[in-house]
Amino acid sequence: MRTPPAGIDAPPRMQGRTPIDPADLVLSVLIPVYNERATIEAIVAQVRSVPVRKQIICVDDCSRDGTVDVLRAMKAVGTIDILIVHEVNRGKGAAIRTALAASTGNVVIVQDADLEYDPADWPTLLDPIIDGRADAVFGSRFLGGPHRVLYFWHSVGNAVLTMLSNMLTNLNLTDMETCYKAIRGNVARSLVLTSDRFGFEPEVTARLARANVRIFEVPISYSGRTYAEGKKIGWKDGVAAIWHIIKFNVGA
């Protein structure tokens, strides 16, 4: 963060806000996992390669493909810090809430286990929080970062959901549904979150907007999967997202 010259006040956005000394940064990485045996070791290796002090928390949401055995082996050798196993499948949102409750870092970030999002983008997400400009930073797949070209109707659906969310939150995001949301730890843990499944994204966006925190958006890369490669979200989740957007902005 640049210090204003003597005699010049800090910009209003900096007043009353405390930057985070990079030496004091602890990033809690929340990894919800469901049937990701093929990718979990690779994504954790990518997470560990980022040069930031971190707390890696994996929550297995009752995987049925042997993922939990891989996770237990990783925990045994210290590759991950915390492993929590759901005895029944509760959904991505529930797994994130479980991980968030166990977190202690002064910044938290959700990391999908499917290799679609690259931890190499973290520094871009963390900078506005570290220098005191932001309380939450969304990583947008639609601001010019490199991305794999895939489904047209997914991009249309995402744009519609983001527009509807923006209309009700009065934000101007380009990618409400992004996995990459870096949030100050005390802010994230203060939010009352209830979504169990894919309603987490519209809910956390609505809660942050209602809390009147400073939200930034930065470009990230994205390497989406096909359904043959294991992509889980479908059109029914898009319909459900409309309900969640309305519910958490109007009814809750």
Image (cartoon, grey):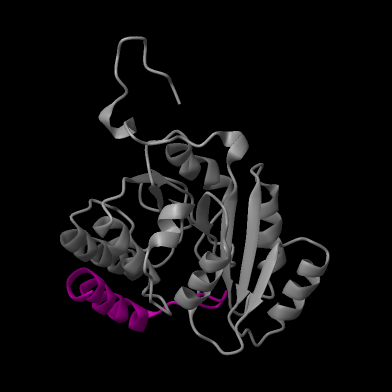
* Magenta span: 227-252
Q: Is residue 98 left or right of residue 144?
A: right
Q: Main secondary structure of the magenta part?
A: helix
The foreground one among 109 and 241 is: 109
Q: Is residue 146 above or below residue 133?
A: below
User: Which of the 4 image quarters holds residue 39?
Assistant: bottom right
Give percent across and percent down for residue 160: 23, 66
Q: Is residue 173 above or below residue 63?
A: above
Residue at 63% across, 84% down: 63
Residue at 59% across, 67% down: 113
Q: Is residue 120 left or right of residue 15?
A: right
Say whether residue 65 is magenta: no
The quadrant in which the C terminus is found is bottom left
Give percent across and percent down for residue 43: 65, 61
Q: Is residue 78 left or right of residue 1?
A: right
Quick check: can you spot residue 33? yes
Quick check: can you spot residue 178? no
Residue extending furthest toward the right: 77
Give percent across and percent down for residue 50: 65, 46
Say whether residue 251 is magenta: yes
Residue at 61% across, 88% down: 87
Residue at 72% across, 65% down: 41
Q: Is residue 159 above or below residue 125?
A: below
Residue extending furthest toward the top: 6
Give percent across and percent down for residue 81: 71, 62
The quadrant in which the N terminus is found is top left
Q: How many marks?
A: 0
